[in-house]
Amino acid sequence: MKSLFIKIFGGEPRIKVLDFIISEPGIPFYKNELVKKTKISRITATKILKELESQDIIKKYADVGKVVQYIMNKENFYTKLLLDFDFRLSEKYARSISKKMQLKSRS
């Protein structure tokens, strides 16, 4: 099932990566995991991760040999906005579903 974030903004690779990152903001992740869950290529993932790292949206969490683990930088201004937006979006969606359910139960 597509997330609300992807339903609204589309399924472009960068959107998929941002959605993946904001869905579990405190959980470190590997590039391979990102590639598997977002279904984007390794080359595209590498490019996007480099961009997000240069923008300080993500940061390296751990280096294990040649494998790097990343984590969302929750202190970044833009990251805070993304998390807040995602929360508000989910909240609004939940309210609209609740209203629909109330209307159905009344009929």
Image (cartoon, helix red, strand yellow):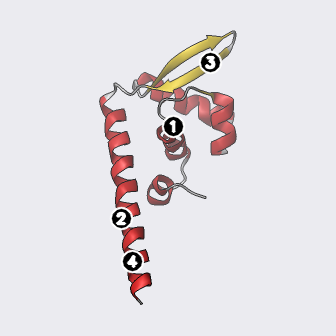
Dot 2 amino acid type: Arg
Which residue type does callout 1 highlight? Glu
- Residue 82 position, x and y percent, is 36, 41
Residue occupied by mark 2 = 95
User: What type is the residue that disc 4 sits on?
Assistant: Gln
Percent position (x, y) of residue 59?
47, 21
Q: CA distance from mark 1 to mark 4?
A: 31 Å
User: How many marks can you see?
Assistant: 4
Q: Earlier in the sequence, mark 3 or mark 2?
A: 3
Q: Is residue 103 above or below residue 25?
A: below
Of 85 and 101, the residue lying toward us = 101
Q: Quadrant of the N terminus?
A: bottom right
Circle 3 or circle 2, nearest the eye: 2
Taking the image as shown, residue 80 lies to the left or right of residue 69, namely left
As measured in the structure, the alpha-carbon distance from the residue carrying label 3 to the one carrying label 4 is: 48 Å
Circle 2 sits in a helix, a strand or a loop, which is it? helix
From what the image shows, is residue 70 above or below residue 23? above
Q: Residue at x 37, y 48 (%)?
A: 87
Q: Earlier in the sequence, mark 1 or mark 4?
A: 1
Q: Which residue is mark 4?
A: 102
From the image, which quarter does the C terminus lie in?
Answer: bottom left
Residue 40 at least partly seen: no
Q: Which residue is mark 1?
A: 24
Q: Residues within 10 Å of mark 2 (few under 14, many from 20)?
A: few
Mark 3 or mark 4: name the one nearer the start of the chain: 3
Residue lying at 50% horizontally and 42% vertically, measured from the top left:
23
Could you tell me which residue is drawn at 39 percent across and 77 percent down? Answer: 102
Which residue bears the numbered disc 3? 68
